[in-house]
Amino acid sequence: MEFKTFVFYFLSAILVFAGLRVITARNPVHAALYLVLAFFSASGVWMLLQAEFLAIALVLVYVGAVMVLFLFVVMMLDINLDRLREGFWSYLPLGAIIALLMVTEMALVLGGNYLGLFESSVPQAASDASNVQAVGRLMFTEYVYPFELASVILLVGIIAAVALTQREKRKNKSVDASQQVFVKARDRVRVLQMPAEKRD
Amino acid sequence: MTLAEMQFLTPDLRIAAAEIFILLMACLILMFDLLAKDRKRTATFVSTQLTLVGAAVITFSMSSGEISYTFSNMYVADLMADLLKLLLYLTVMVVLFYSRGYILEREQMAKGEYYALALFATLGMMVMISANHFVTVYIGLELLSLSLYAMVAMNRDSVPATEAAMKYFVLGALASGLLLYGMSMIYGATGTLEITAVAERLFMGQADQTILVFGMVFLVSGVAFKLGVVPFHMWIPDVYHGAPTAVTLFIATAPKLAAFAMVIRLLVNGLIVLSADWQSMLILLSVMSMAIGNIAAIAQTNLKRMLAYSAISHMGFMLLGMVTGVVGGDARFALNAYSSSMFYVITYVLTSAGTFGMILLLARAGFESDEIDDFKGLNKRSPWFAAMMMMMMFSMAGVPFFVGFFAKFSVLQAVVAAGYLWLAIVAIIFSLIGCFYYLRIVKIMYFDQPTNSLPIAAPLDVKVLMSANGLAVALLGIFPQALMSLCAFALLRSL
């Protein structure tokens, strides 16, 4: 067995195992950590396919940013594990039917010899340069217009977030001395006239 | 091909000068707004309006009448784009003018961000109008939608507005997904995302038909979502109703121009070879929109909601022009049909701006004036504005010698010329049904007793603008020929 093939099977095995553990782990924090592992192995598989850019983006964006955020949220939330598992048996029949359908669909696609799916092979790399270089170069030459506009969309996202969440400045409790000296006695004490009530 | 062999032409930035100007000004306005102490944001408002005037000057002076491309063919400038952009600036200016009083009375909306978001939305629409690449269509659409979602939600403490923003956001994201999926399918079939190149490959018959038709179906669905035609219309009534009226006015006007441009770019410029397929889809969408829009509008008691259903039926009517472009491989009627659609959408935007503007004119702090009953006896309170509203309603209903009549007439003419007599008859029947709810507003204004007798409190400039808007509806009805031939000329030089 070639070393590359070995690496592929090694990574794939970890990927499948981690994927399984994501849905079977009882502790949500463990599930999230297994998801990180799954992402990491998947990026390794992409690296084998010489899609470095995708691999790096997956690690940087998903593992680095999204999953960390996810972990924080999961740790902050007070999740009642027993409540989550309630009703498992009553959902099982429907779940089983959906799972069966999905397995059938996958079998149809994977057993695709009849459908001619395997005739298409992995395309050859379009350029001798590395992926990152090619993507970067295209982004700043041919695709510069949508690329710049995408940054405008992010800017609009920031503006929207600020405009929608920012409340007025918090009322400061310190005393403004220049205003304070103008205070009058009737501003501090208010005398109310109330009808006297009889005590019972 | 190696990287060294890749040819790259430095884009000609002058062609896209208007877009660059708007973007720069939006950022500057946003920055200087931070320093503004003025609660009314007069400086921000004035500079936003001046930006739009400036963009109009740039677009007008850059307009050469030739089709020119830049940014690696992702951006196209042609006469249709120039005309639509000029109308777009005008619409946004009018909309902001009408909205001014309304947003000043609502504390959370009276912020500089409102104007910046309006400018960014305008930029998004300009990008859509000038797109010659699926990616640019999509990016422009997202820029527009994202700004609109934020504008709808800006009145944070209003529960209906927040709910409307949420619905708009979720359904808008779904529609974008459909559109993207369709685009990716077409990319798979043709190997390119450039709209003119897609048309070329299709013309040479180098595409997998199954994938192509699959992609086209998703593309049409995505476009239908954005236009708000049945069965992709469910967001329209809720968003129109829930959003603050100033934002409803914005959503109901300017984006329709951009959506028209999107239909032209994607379906006519890109997929004209498949016209037989998408035309039959559009016929279905159009007939259903006219039916459901006009019938559901009758049952509404809220004017904004009624106008939302009316918008659905109008967009259905507008699509009628698009379905009659190519008949049996014969494109003789195409120009006539598409220009009638363009005329229709322009006049609809004009009338719609006036109608929602009237709701804003009557609204005050703490009073929305968006129920139909709020218009009771308007004639006793202000005969002049009741007459303006009557003209808008007549125009929308298609009463002769108002501009809406000529718009409907020219579309029907195109439909009949293309041989779809039955379609014309269906359209006329539903328009007649639609007359009922427009004329009911007129009846309420003139024959019912007013519930309050307060005079109209709007400032003079808004009143003048509203009068100009109403008179434009009347005058264009008497002299529709100039605008009609302008539309035809612009499309002739662009397609």
Image (spheres, rainbow, N blue to C red):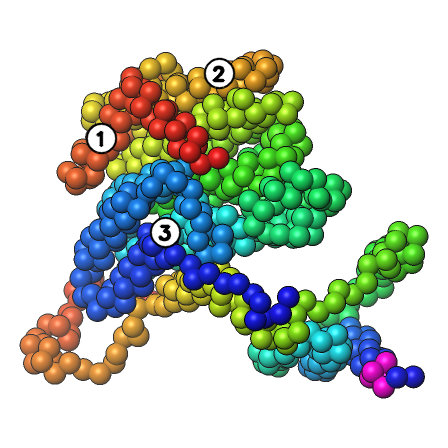
The kind of residue on which mark 2 rests is Gln
Range of residues picked out in magenta: A3-7
Residue at the location (83% across, 83% down)? A4
Overall secondary structure of the magenta section: helix
Q: Are marks 1 and 3 in contact (CB under 8 Å)?
A: no
Q: Mark 3 is on which residue type?
A: Ile
Tell me whether marks 1 and 2 sit on the same chain.
yes
N-terminal of the two: label 1 or label 2?
A: 2
Residue at the bottom extreme, as displayed: A3
Q: Circles 1 and 2: CB distance less than 8 Å?
A: no
Tell me the subunit letter for badge 3. Answer: B
Give B213 or A83, whichever is nearer the viewer: B213
Disc 1/disc 3 C-alpha distance (Å): 33 Å
Task: Find residue B84 and report its horizontal and vertical position in percent.
Answer: 38, 39
Query: Which mark is first along the chain, 3 or 1?
Result: 3
Chain label for disc 2: B
- Does residue B430 appear in the picture of this structure? no
The residues bearing labels 3 and 2 have C-alpha atoms spaced at a distance of 36 Å
Query: Between residues B234 and B415, which one lies in front from this camera angle?
Result: B415
Mark 1 and mark 3, same subunit? yes
Q: Position of residue B198 (x, y in %)?
A: 61, 45
Amino acid at circle 1: Ala
Q: Which residue is mark 2?
A: B413
Looking at the image, which is closer to me, A130 or B451?
A130
User: Considering only vertical position in the picture, is B182 above or below A170?
Assistant: above
Determine which of the numbered discs, if any, sits on residue B15 in the image: 3
Q: Is residue A38 left or right of residue B273?
A: right
Chain for numbered disc 1: B
Left/right of residue B88 with respect to residue B46 in the rendered view: right
Q: For numbered disc 2, what is the local secondary structure?
A: helix
**Do badges 3 and 2 share one subunit?**
yes
- The residue under label 1 is B468
